[in-house]
């Protein structure tokens, strides 16, 4: 299935024809994170999703949601909220997010994700180790390990895109995919 | 003897029960606090005092972890914890820390690998106990 990442709304619509588990749009905080995780987990449980896939999905959701909490900002001129989507079809579980990002942060983030995507399993393990040893825990409580962790858990490339809104701000769309059948 | 440190679990944070009197040092639950450093600060502060006091005491300290979900920043802090335990074992005259992790056998392989890496990186004896084995 081709994912129309270009427009989060059309992505949402196309996913409605799939088994869409959850969509949340608005302000993100720890309470929202808690509710979203609890709802998704209940849904996965009731669908009898494999516990390994469930755990991976849960871990990725935690990293994605906390990333949004830490890095989100409100721009009064841009009426565009952060969004979080979880979808599931026969092959995959998808975790998608969209949030505003300052344009000056795009180059570094692109470089980071491209580096992660260039690594195989062993390479990711090594990268995680390097970052763990060299990182410091920032003021917002992150250590910059989140994307590597997501890639390791998802075992697929991280799909991402930036849609420019104006000279200062873009919309950052991220998609992590967990393949249900590993064989 | 240092007073016990007890922190109740929440959806995001594990139950911490460090009770020297009862000889219990356990961390049980999930760990993905929004601000990992802030949550673990009192834990590290408590341990620093406790480990310093315990150096000359002839008593082994058994630490028990049962954490099934943890975020990447928590993992980083657990490596620092392993380092502190390792330093203690190298410095202490008599006491020795042992560390057991209880894992579910269905746990994702990255997590198991991470714990094994903590074990090798810290050169520290960590016993990894799987739930299924523990029950049999």
Image (spheres, coloured by chain):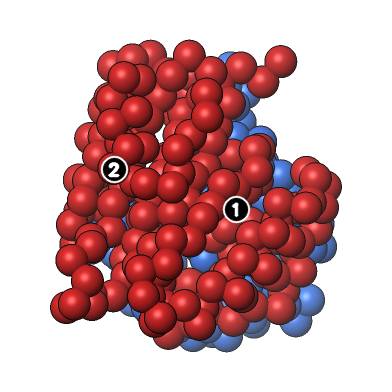
User: Can you give x and y, in whole percent of width and height, for residue B68 in the image?
Assistant: 48, 42
Residue B131 is situated, as x and y percent measured from the top left of the image, at: 55, 28
Q: Position of residue A101 (x, y in %)?
A: 40, 71
**Residue positioned 22% across, 46% down in the render:** A24
Query: Which hue is chain A drawn in?
Result: red
- Label at residue A9: 2
Q: Using the rendered image of the protein, determine whether residue A115 is visible from the camera's viewpoint.
A: yes
User: Where is A102 relative to B9, above or below?
Assistant: below
Residue at (69, 59) in percent of width and height: A114
Residue B128 lies left or right of residue A46; in this view the side is right
| Mark closest to the chain's N terminus, 2 or 1 | 2
Placement of the N terminus of chain B among the 4 image quadrants: bottom left
Report the front residue among A164 and A75.
A164
Q: Which mark is residue A149?
A: 1
Q: Residues within 10 Å of mark 1 (few under 14, many from 20)?
A: many
- Mark 2, mark 1: which one is toward the viewer? 2
Give me the residue at 53% from left, 18% from top: A91
Q: Chain of mark 2?
A: A
- In 3D space, how far apart are the residues under numbered discs 2 and 1 (Cα atoms)? 27 Å
- In the picture, measured across the screen, residue B113 lies left or right of residue B104, that is right
| Quarter of the view holding residue A132 | bottom right
Left or right side of A50 for A62:
left
Residue A13's mark? none
In the picture, residue A23 is in which quadrant?
top left
Identity of the residue drawn at 60% across and 74% down: A107
User: What colour denotes chain B?
Assistant: blue
Position of residue B134 relative to residue B36, above or below, is above
Tell me the subunit letter for badge 1. A
Q: Which quadrant of the figure contains the C terminus of chain B? A: top right
Residue A112 position (above or below residue A54) = below
């Amino acid at each position: 299935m081709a994912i129309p990442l270009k427009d989060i709304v059309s992505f949402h619509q196309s996913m409605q024809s799939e088994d869409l588990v959850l969509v949340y749009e608005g302000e993100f905080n720890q309470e929202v994170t808690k509710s979203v995780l609890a709802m998704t987990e209940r849904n996965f449980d009731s669908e009898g999703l494999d516990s390994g896939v469930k755990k991976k999905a849960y871990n990725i959701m935690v990293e994605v949601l906390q990333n949004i909490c830490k890095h989100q900002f409100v721009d009064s001129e841009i009426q565009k909220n952060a969004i979080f989507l979880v979808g599931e079809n026969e092959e995959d579980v998808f975790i998608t997010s969209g949030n505003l990002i300052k344009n000056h942060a795009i180059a570094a983030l692109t470089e980071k994700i491209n580096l992660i995507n260039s690594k195989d399993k062993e390479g990711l393990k090594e990268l995680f180790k390097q970052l763990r040893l060299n990182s410091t825990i920032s003021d917002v409580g992150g250590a910059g390990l989140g994307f590597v962790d997501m890639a390791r858990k998802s075992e697929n490339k991280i799909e991402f895109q930036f849609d420019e809104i104006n000279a200062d701000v873009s919309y950052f769309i991220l998609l992590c995919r967990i393949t249900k059948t590993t064989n | 003897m240092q007073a016990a440190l007890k922190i109740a679990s929440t959806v995001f944070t594990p139950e911490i029960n460090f009770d020297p009197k009862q000889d219990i040092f356990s961390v049980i639950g999930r760990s993905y606090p929004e601000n990992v450093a802030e949550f673990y600060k009192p834990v590290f502060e408590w341990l620093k005092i406790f480990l310093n006091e315990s150096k000359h005491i002839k008593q082994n300290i058994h630490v028990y972890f049962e954490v099934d979900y943890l975020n990447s920043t928590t993992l980083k802090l657990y490596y620092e914890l392993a380092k502190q335990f390792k330093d203690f074992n190298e410095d202490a005259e008599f006491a020795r820390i042992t560390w057991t992790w209880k894992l579910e056998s269905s746990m994702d392989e990255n997590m198991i690998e991470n714990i094994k890496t903590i074990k090798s990186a810290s050169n520290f004896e960590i016993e990894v106990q799987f739930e299924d084995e523990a029950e049999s």
